[in-house]
Image (spheres, rainbow, N blue to C red):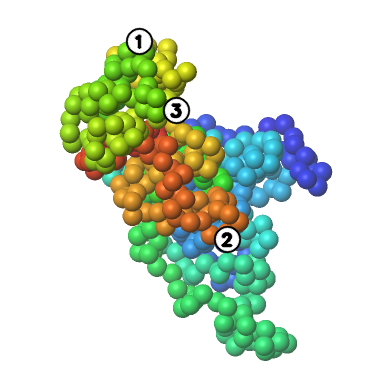
Amino acid sequence: MASIYWADPDGFALTTPTPLGRRAVKAALIVRLDLDDAHPPIWRQLRLASDLTLPQVHEVVQIAMGWTDSHLHHFVMGPDTHDPTTQHFLTPFDIAEGDKGIPESDVHLDQVISEPGDCLFYEYDFGDSWWHTMKLESVEPWRAGDTDAWCLAGQRACPPEDLGGIGGLEELLNWLDGRTEGADPEWVQQVLDWLPPGYDPVAFSVDEVNAVLARGLLPPLEQFHPMVSILMRNAGGSPLSDLGELIRRADLGSPSLTERDMADAVRGYQVLLAEIGDGLTLTQAGYLPPRVVQQILTELGPETEWVGIGTREDTSQTVSSLRRSATALGLVRLSRGRLTVTSNGRRLAGDPPHLLRHIATRLPLGKQHEQDAGTIALLFVAAGKDWLHSFDEAARIMEWIGWRTGGDAFLDERAVHIWSKPTRDVLQNLGGSGLSTPNRQIAVARYLLQTADQR
């Protein structure tokens, strides 16, 4: 342990843990996960990839045990016994509260358990205080094709949420066995009626756990645009949530964009910048001249104009969207009725890859509610889902984040569609929606969700 100390809220000195060195080669760690003090024992045996991050281990524990990820959690490093003076690794909620220490997202499984017998401790639900012990049983070579997490064995069902901890579990098991002496019969019946439908304390299915694990774990959020991490934190942070499932499906690994794809994606903006040239005076109504609108549509091809007549900017969805979003992206500016190309626009117009990177750095567009909705829209497209048929699901996610309209208890799904429009316009102009192929839609959205160093 390191000799660095922080004080917890009660004033006790806490020792900051010292993570172990990483393994040179990925390995399979066979661990036993026990719910502490449960009698009869509730346990799982798992095969875990040594390079899992602690947030991913948290997800595995929730799935393997059967919890619903409805409460906060902490990991505490061993290696052998749970020492209450050892500081836990910080969750995003701890960091948001200003706590000092080591973020769990910076720690991998092989940095907390390395040799057989090493233990990692996990507390879930600080009210019920369900403590778990993960003990390393053996280390095996990693086999290509294995999933990052797999359940090998286990016994007994996870306790219901909000049961009251180990004491509540012991009481419940007694009542289920008919041992109700000294208990209020009415209260006993209320608790039994409150149990989840079909709850059986003896039941456990390895196959059911593995069916969920087979979907894959939530990738590290550091791989995504920073807005994705913000959304997850504001939505509660659960990898088992609707937002977590959406992020899991928005795999950034493939399909990727080639240089030709990038050139095709930004062509609309290049044509607009070329037509503006050294400057362009707008009509008295504030629109692009009709000849310019017609020239842009001719350059892009008739298949791009899927809404509008295409003779004036105010009737051409394609051109109005291009001009509006190019302004928001810092490529053009309007001053005294004259449209000009910015220095960024001039510098990037002939360089499709860098132009696309510039566009990506400006997203999502708009105010905070529009940025949140725009990021969610990108995630839906990146996950291969039809945005136009996903408004209700997107509205639920926005509600979890905390957005409402007019003080209503629920968010009007139409609001999500409207709020996401600034970012969706860019996605459409890049070929990420509209008449483009599904694979192209997905690839563009995934590119826009990458971090800057991945592009």
Q: Which residue position is annotated with label 2?
A: 409
- Quarter of the rendering occupied by the N terminus: top right
Depth check, front residue: 327 or 38: 327
- Percent x, y of residue 305: 23, 36
Which element is circle 1 on?
A: loop
Give SS at disc 3: helix
Q: Is residue 87 left or right of residue 396?
A: right
**Figure check: 207 above or below 138:** below
Q: Amino acid at mark 1?
A: Asp
How packed mark 2 is, by other alpha carbons closer than 10 Å (few <14, some 14-19, many 20 or more), is few
The disc at residue 328 is 3
Between the residue at mark 1 and the residue at mark 3, the CA separation in whole angstroms equals: 19 Å
Q: Vertical placement of 9 versus 38: above or below?
A: above
Identify the image quadrant of the C terminus: top left
Nearest to viewer (mark 1 / mark 2): 1
Residue 229 locus on image (x, y percent): 51, 40
The residue identified by callout 1 is: 278
Dot 1 or dot 3, earlier in sequence: 1
